[in-house]
Amino acid sequence: MPRLFLLALFWTAAATAQDVTAIRCGRLFDGRNLTLRENVTVIVAGNRIREVGGAIPPGARVIDLSRATVLPGLVDSHTHMYLHGTPYEEALLKRSLQYRAIWATVAARKTLLAGFTSVRDIETEGAWYGDAALRDAINDGLVIGPRMQAATRALSITGGYTPYGYSPDVEIPHGAQLADGIDGVRKAVREQLANGADLIKIYADHRRRGAHDPDKLVAFPTFSFDEIRTIVEEASKTGAKVAAHVYHSQAAQTAIRAGVASLEHGMYLDDETFRLMAEKGVYWVPTLMAYLQGLDEPARIAPERRRMMLGTTSRHKETFQRALKLPVKIAFGTDLSGNHENAGQEFVWMVEYGMKPLEVLRSATLTAAELMGWQDRVGTVEAGKLADLTAVDGNPVTDIAAMKRAVFVMKDGVVYKQP
Ligand SMILES: [Zn+2]
């Protein structure tokens, strides 16, 4: 029965993709212009957008979204399909890779149905090359999910990634691939690219319990400039970009000067770093909601951890508000773990912290597509682009929470969700 169901589904999908579809949009955000146009019809032929505006061609299938706001398919620049909300070490040490892969297919489906048609999956957290396999399975039509770029394993230095605290006599898997020195990082990048990585993710700094004060987290830079430069050089041979997880300015500036394409999180970045990013065209993916999850449920989080989280989020907010006054490019990213259906909440936080709604919409469409290098394919509603479209219930300019209510999702001309 499941096989028959899938066959029927894909036959319908294939047949649909050949048709011409006219989508009546109550409001349209095209991803490029900071405005909402009213009562526009988008014509889709096969898997491409044929025309924006104009009359409905005779014989076209009509989809009425006149009560909704239509946008380009949303782009999340920071996902982890292999993280599922369980304690980190449980996922790493107690779940099989097969189980985690099944989880990941569920996450991919939730992500697509939340309106996200493209994602940059930025490491599997110990599940090896699983995101590259998931990407291929989606492209082959085996499972439903967004277009994906896969970072595979990510890179940090020895001592630069969890888990810690186990006997040195026991070999424990780590969430990232650990590599040291020029030759070490070069080989690691080559391995990841050979096994399907579309981009490389590094930890430019890392926090760990202090040696002298185990109650305190100590942040330290990981790779040297020369190591990051080597990673960037090696990645660029295949056109792969490098994303750097970083919290602090010192490591951020090393990574920027070594040529990374984006900084992830960055809640303690200073103005000098943002200016350097603007000068070098480096994107910032702030991932606000990753640090806000669970704060509204005090019972779930230990008081000490809650205090630490509140300190981090207040700095994040202040940094985000400073960045808004500078010409830094902000790409939307959620860094969600498990609750991938809630990705729309990041829009709410970005507006709450002071970004204008239309600018937030552009950061989750054209800007994020540019970071992926996919701006010629996705990220805007324009003739010739791939037919990736999302519609939300309501007007996100007056009520940004509308972004949590995706009512229509089309990817590659195929409708996955419809009112
Ligand atoms: Zn992350």
Image (cartoon, helix red, strand yellow):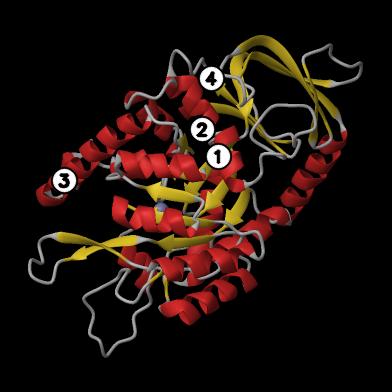
The residue labelled by disc 1 is 368
Question: In the figure, is residue 2 to the left or right of 57?
Answer: left
Q: CA distance from mark 1 to mark 2?
A: 6 Å
| Disc 2: residue Cβ within 8 A of ligand 1's nearest atom | no
- The mark that comes first in sequence, 1 or 3, is 3
Label ID, residue 363: 2
Q: In the rendered view, would you say 305 is above or below 369?
A: below
Give amino acid for label 3.
Arg
Q: CA distance from mark 4 to mark 1?
A: 22 Å
Q: Which mark is residue 393?
A: 4
Left or right: 100, with 268 as reference point = right
Q: Is residue 179 left or right of residue 378?
A: left
Q: Position of residue 356 (x, y in %)?
A: 43, 20
Q: Secondary structure at mark 4?
A: strand
* Residue 342 tag number: none
Marked residue nearer the N-terminal end (1 or 2):
2
Q: Quarter holding the C terminus?
A: top right
Q: Whole-percent x and y of residue 331?
A: 49, 38
| Eye-nearest disc, 2 or 3 | 2
Sequence-wise, the earlier of marks 2 and 4 is 2
Amino acid type at circle 2 is Ser
Q: Is mark 3 within 8 Å of ligand 1?
A: no
Residue depth check, mark 4 versus mark 3: number of the one nearer the observer: 3
Residue tagged by mark 3?
306
Residue neighbourhood size for the residue with mark 4, other residues' Cα within 10 Å, grouped as few (<14), some (14–19), many (≥20): some
- Rate crowding at label 1 as few (under 14), some (14 to 19) or many (20 or more) other CA atoms within 10 Å: many
Q: Is residue 408 left or right of residue 362?
A: right
